[in-house]
Image (cartoon, helix red, strand yellow):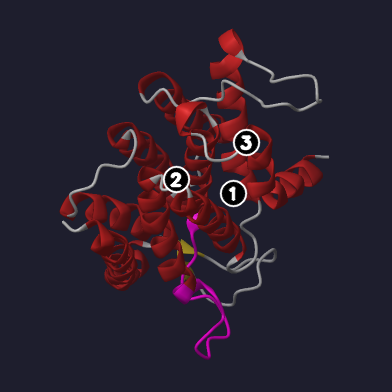
Amino acid sequence: METEKMPALLFLTSLLTTIIFIVVLYPCAQKIGLLDKPNYRKHHQKPVPLIGGVAIYFAILFTLLITDIQIFQQTGFIAAATILVLVGLLDDYREVAVKYRILAQIIATLIMTEISEIKIMDLGDLFGTGHIKLEAFSTAFTVFAVVGGINAFNMIDGIDGLSGSLALVSVITLAILSWSLENWLIYYYCLILAATIIAFLLFNLRIFGRKSAAIFLGDTGSTLLGFSVCWLAIYASQGENAIITPTSVLWLIAIPLLDSVSVMC
């Protein structure tokens, strides 16, 4: 396939596929009760389907299936994302204990570090004294950082469009950097993820005359987006493929991180 046509194909395929999955899954969610029901803590007045994350997940898989590209460590990413999506779905449908959700996030991150070998090895020059190498502590630190990042996006998902929009900003930033440096593996994956988020936001934001969101991400979507952004950011800041410094990663997810730290404090 011609290289110049690939970006447009990936973006449009991901965008349209996500929209199709949302339309198909909407009545299914209503039928089986995969809904966020109103209560005293919530502003929406009627049950809202929790299908945003599922649609994004299926759209990513479909796009990778029908195109002839291989994103970096594709098998590992799909395996880890599948674990998060399955546990997220269970949590959206029937609440899952926090310890099991954390366990699933740790397993997904270990797939990332030990099978896909994507981990934080270098923290950069944080204090102006030279690069800080983690060496034997890299796996433990990566697990801590990624689980924290996943839950940062989860915790900030309380306003229509907020978690999705922040993830989109991070992904588009990485897309621009990878395009400018001709790192096509990162660029192509950013395009796929950005398109699915945009498609979700079309149904989640209060646009086109809507007074409330038509669908929500659910824990499935917020954890998937948090993990995907962390996966991209770590790959883009470590080793020979680095396009940004490790310290710059903090700016990509600064708002979710500061929000989650404030909540915990």
- What secondary structure is found at the residue carrying circle 2? helix
Lower sequence index among marks 2 and 1? 2
Question: For the point 33% across and 71% down, which residue is it?
Answer: 19
Question: With respect to residue 151, does 14 lie above or below?
Answer: below
Lower sequence index among marks 3 and 2? 2
Q: Is residue 57 visible?
A: yes
Q: Is residue 168 found left or right of 183 in the rendered image?
A: right
For label 1, the residue is: 154
For label 3, the residue is: 245
Reply yes or no: does residue 212 show up in magenta. yes
Q: Nearer the viewer, residue 209 or 76?
A: 76
Question: For the point 57% across and 17% down, which residue is it?
Answer: 138
Specify the farthest residue to the front. Answer: 181
Proximity of marks 2 and 1: CB atoms separated by less than 8 Å: no
Question: For the point 58% across and 11% down, which residue is it?
Answer: 135
For label 2, the residue is: 88
Span colored in magenta: 202-218
Q: CA distance from mark 2 to mark 1?
A: 11 Å
Question: With respect to residue 51, does 141 lie above or below?
Answer: above
Q: Quadrant of residue 130?
A: top right
- In the image, what residue type sits under mark 3? Thr
Question: With respect to residue 138, does 7 lie above or below?
Answer: below
- Whole-percent x, y for residue 115 in the image: 36, 21
